[in-house]
Each structure stands twice: as structure tokens, then as C-alpha cells.
Amino acid sequence: MKTLFKILFIGTALMVLAAMFGGFALLHHHGGSDLHVVLDDGEFFLGGSDFGDWLGASIGLFVAGIVCVIVVPLVLLLGVALPLLIVGGVLALMVACVLGVGAVLGSPLILLGLLLFVVLRNRRRSMAAQSSAV
């Protein structure tokens, strides 16, 4: 399964890079008409001669790439994996407490069982030594 997750991660990273390069290529195309972007009923015209438009669009692509590469994985990690780790830790602590209480309450029986085990084991060894000596 580790290989599958590595392949999926590499594929996702390559797709993000391809999208970033595609956006960069759209911004820096030469020839044809100017770039016209419509976003939420707002129209933006990126002309070939205005350096500020190109700079702003390039910075926007850079910020979007950083968000896709760094922010989204961190949000998923902290939003999904961290609560699961906390719940798992609490459950493990509860199981440890239950086992600890069971060990304290059952300690007389555990000691009695240990003593019986030692006595019966020694009896079997002595019986085996007597039967081999005869």
C-alpha cells in the first residue's frame, strides 16, 4: 500500500505542476488576441503591453501553486489525521486504564496462578528426573 500512496502523491504533484505550467504558458503566450478572463461577472483583460497585469497574474499563479502544494496537504493532515490520532490516543489510554484496573483487581488470582505454575512445573521436573534415573 505504501507504493500506491507514493504513486498517487507523485501523480498529484505532477498534475499540480502541469496546471501551473499551463497557466504560465497561457499568461506568456505570444501572438493571437489578448487574454480575457471572466471571474464572478468581472472581466479582466490582460494586454500584451501592460507589465503590471502580467506581474499580478504571475504572482497569483505562484500563490495558487503554493496553496495547492503546501496549504491543502497541511489542512488535510491537520483536519483529518490529527483528530483521528487524538481519538486513537484516548482509546488506547482507556484500554490501558481498564487493563491496569483489571490487573490490580486480579492480582491475587494472578499470584496464586503463578505459584501453582511454579509448583507444578517443579513437580513435573522432579518426576521426569526420577523416571529417567530408574
Image (tube, grey):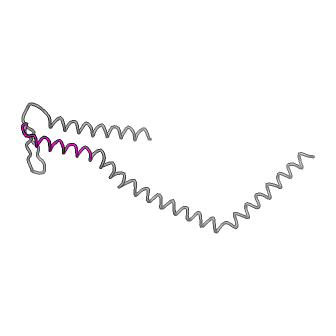
Of the 4 image quadrants, the one containing the N terminus is: top left
Residue shown at 79% from the left, 54% from the top: 121
Residue at horizontal 18 percent and vertical 44 percent from the top: 59
58 within the magenta span: yes
Placement of 41 over or under 48, stated as above or below:
below
Report the number of discs.
0
Instruction: Judge from the rendering whether residue 49 lies leftward or rightward of residue 76; answer left or right.
Output: left
- View extreme (bottom): residue: 105
Image quadrant of residue 106?
bottom right
Vertical position of residue 34 compared to residue 68: above or below? above
Q: Position of residue 117 (x, y in %)?
A: 76, 58
The residue closer to the viewer here, 68 or 87, is 68
Q: Position of residue 6 (x, y in %)?
A: 39, 39
Task: Please name whichever residue, 66 or 98, is drawn nearer the observer in this view of the structure.
Answer: 66
The quarter holding residue 10 reads top left
Q: Position of residue 25 (x, y in %)?
A: 17, 34
Q: Residue at x 13, y 40 (%)?
A: 54
Q: Residue furthest right?
A: 134
The location of residue 131, given as percent across then percent down, is: 89, 48
Q: Does residue 100 belong to the magenta stretch?
A: no
Q: Quadrant of residue 8?
A: top left
Q: Main secondary structure of the magenta part?
A: helix
Q: Is residue 73 left or right of residue 1?
A: left
> Is residue 1 shown left or right of residue 11?
right
Where does the magenta region start and end?
Answer: 49-66
